[in-house]
Image (cartoon, rainbow, N blue to C red):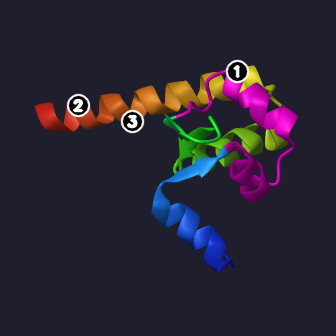
Amino acid sequence: MQSNTDLYQLNSHLISFTQICDCCELPATTLAEMLDYGVIAPSAMTITEHEALYEAECIQKVRKAARLCRDLEVNIAGAALALDLLDEINTLRERLLIVE
């Protein structure tokens, strides 16, 4: 069950790198590697601390990538590629629905 803090963070739509690590129970090095491979990308920066902020939806992508790595034993680069291909498939399906 999510705490009130988690619910606030999800409702605020922007979360920090550390919050993603905590929420997804991943070490910072793993999340940094996901960032390097483009699994997620920052959406904004804080003014005072110059910290990157991410859309709350990034949590779902990070969890998917972590599951791909864990369950299918692919590396992070492979998980990033799989997520890109899934996004492309979803985009093409949406475009097909518009055409039909």
- Crowd class of label 2 (few under 14; some 14 to 19; many from 20; radius 10 Å): few
Determine whether label 2 and label 1 are within 8 Å by CB: no
Which residue sits at x=65%, y=47%?
Answer: 16
The magenta segment is 17-42
- At label 3, counting other C-alpha atoms closer than 10 Å, the crowd grade (few under 14, some 14-19, many 20 or more) is few
| First along the sequence among labels 1 and 3 | 1
27 drawn magenta: yes
Calculate the distance from the C-alpha at mark 2 to the C-alpha at mark 3: 9 Å
Q: Where in the figure is residue 12, as x and y percent of width and height? A: 48, 61
Residue 35: x percent and y percent? 68, 28
- x 56%, y 30%: residue: 41
Q: Nearer the viewer, residue 76 or 86?
A: 76
Q: What is the three-letter code of the residue carrying label 3?
A: Asn
Residue type at mark 1 is Asp
Q: Amino acid at mark 2?
A: Arg
> Spatial distance from mark 1 to mark 3, Cα to Cα?
23 Å
List the residue tagged with mark 2. Answer: 95
Residue 36: which disc?
Answer: 1
Secondary element at tag 3: helix
* Element marked by disc 2: helix
Residue 20: x %, y % from top left: 69, 50
Residue 90: assigned label: 3
